[in-house]
Amino acid sequence: MKTKKYDEVIQKHAIKPNYFKNALVSFFFGGLICVFGQALIEINVHWLGYVRETASTLATVTIILITSILTGLGVYDDFGQIAKAGAFVPITGFANSLTSAALESKSEGVVLGIATNLFKLAGAVIVFAVISAYVFGIIRYYLIEFGIVQMTSEEAIKMIILTLR
């Protein structure tokens, strides 16, 4: 009975999160990261003369590198407290989680610590990506087979590249 009463008191005095404010903050900082990524792409294309596909790859790698370095320095976690979910835009969140896992397990050694924990984390993402690609590939096959969508492989690849930008 005391546990039930204690839970009621805790719930009564618990600070309720402001979902609207958190969503706005997340949207702002997530958008800021995306604007930074787009700026990197434009710099690579217009100033450095790269093709847009190469520039996109370089921007992605740069953002991953910056996130990993900031995580290693302990700065990205503080940024995550301020930016909420906006700090975990897919590529930055994944880089942060991989780097954090590597840092936490470095005392166990390279193979048994870092590599094992990185594969635990990345494995789930890779499995989900492979399964998703398989399911969407089947859907695409049937859409084309039944004449709902008429698209060549080259058009599909261009559409995927444009979607990923």
Image (cartoon, rainbow, N blue to C red):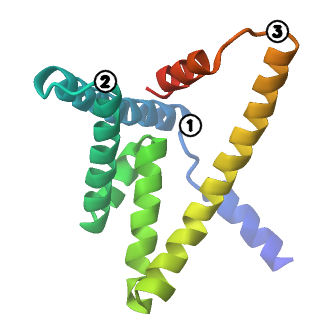
Residue at the (45%, 51%) spot, across then down: 93
In the image shown, does 4 or 137 lie closer to the viewer?
137
* Cα distance in 3D space between marks 1 and 3: 41 Å
Q: Amino acid at mark 2?
A: Arg
Res. 88 in view: no
Give me the residue at 79% from left, 25% from top. Answer: 141
In front: 9, or 108?
A: 108
Residue at the left extreme of this rendering: 47
Classify 10 Å Cα crowding around label 2: few (below 14), some (14-19), many (20 and above).
Answer: some
Callout 2 secondary element = helix
Judge from the rendering whether residue 148 lies leftward or rightward of residue 33; answer left or right. right
Estimate the spatial distance between the alpha carbons at disc 2 and disc 1, rounded to whole Å: 37 Å
Answer with mark 2 or mark 1, whichever residue precedes in sequence.
Answer: 1
Cβ–Cβ under 8 Å for marks 3 and 2: no
The residue pinned by badge 3 equals 148
State which tag comes first along the sequence, 1 or 3: 1
Q: According to the image, label 1 marks what residue? A: 19
- Amino acid found under the numbered disc labelled 1: Tyr
Determine crowd level at label 1: few under 14, some 14-19, many 20+ residues with C-alpha closer than 10 A.
few
Which quarter of the rendering shows the C terminus? top left
